[in-house]
Image: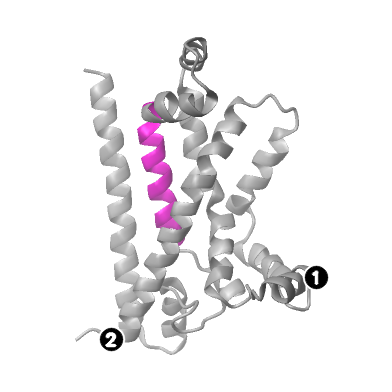
Amino acid sequence: MLDQDFVYTLLLTGKLALVTTTILIIIGIPVAYWITYSRFKLKFIVEALICMPMVLPPTVMGYYLLVAFSPDNAFGQFLEQYFDVRLAFSFNGIVIASIIANLPFMIQPLQNGFSSLPDELRQVSYTMGKSKMVTLIKVLLPNIKTSVITGIALTFAHCIGEFGIVIMVGGNIPKETRIASVAIYDQVQALNFEAANRYAFVLFILSFLTLVLIYSINRRVNMTIFR
């Protein structure tokens, strides 16, 4: 019989990854489109900020988010006073932290996909009287399916393995912020290697299957192109 805490922790991990990935699909597509096609001269600063989680230690980002979310801080006080929301050490807090940490894993594949398309696709669509929104949804996105799937898969896989930023912002609260990666650390600290191995094995399999999905899709697309 499976341990209830083990099952609940995995479900919470999946919930965090699913919520984060869904929100980043909605955010990532317009942002990647803007970065690719905008002529704004300082957009490289936006790109640098988006990619910061790839080079900045997660604990550093987690620390600053925790400070911002704290009720002792102006932003945290504002949220608690006017919206009765406390983000520090809560599930909502780790969702926001996870979204920020996973931004580049969604946006970069989408941006690469848009960049690989010939600009004539957009121009022809505009010439036919299609709006930017219609062009994006019906012309551009169908031609970068591989990039969309890659972004979704990478975001989901990275999210389920997130540790530093989650433990800084959410701590280790059972049934609230204790996801699988945090549980592994907790069990190792308690010298409970059997439980740690169960969590680690599940994360290993999920990560492996995600990579298999990405490479199999890319392989099929490449085979179709070179036929």
Residue shown at the point (78%, 78%) measured from the top left: 72
- Under mark 2, the amino acid is Asp
- Residue 164 visible in rendering: no
- Under mark 1, the amino acid is Ala
Residue shown at the point (62%, 72%) measured from the top left: 87
Say whether residue 205 is left or right of residue 189: left
Residue at the disc numbered 2: 3
- The residues colored magenta run 143-159
Q: In the rendered image, which quarter contains the C terminus?
A: top left
Residue 102, given in percent of the width and then of the height, sits at 53, 53
Say whether residue 151 is left or right of residue 54: left
Q: Is the magenta stretch mostly helix, strand or loop?
A: helix
Vertical order, 38 against 55 (above or below): above
First in residue order: circle 1 vs circle 2: 2
**Is mark 1 in CB contact (under 8 Å) with mark 2?**
no
Q: Farthest residue to the left: give it.
A: 1
Give the alpha-carbon distance from disc 1 to disc 2, as whole Å.
Answer: 41 Å
In the rendered image, residue 157 lying in the magenta stretch gets the answer: yes
Vertical order, 161 against 22 (above or below): below
Residue at the disc numbered 1: 74
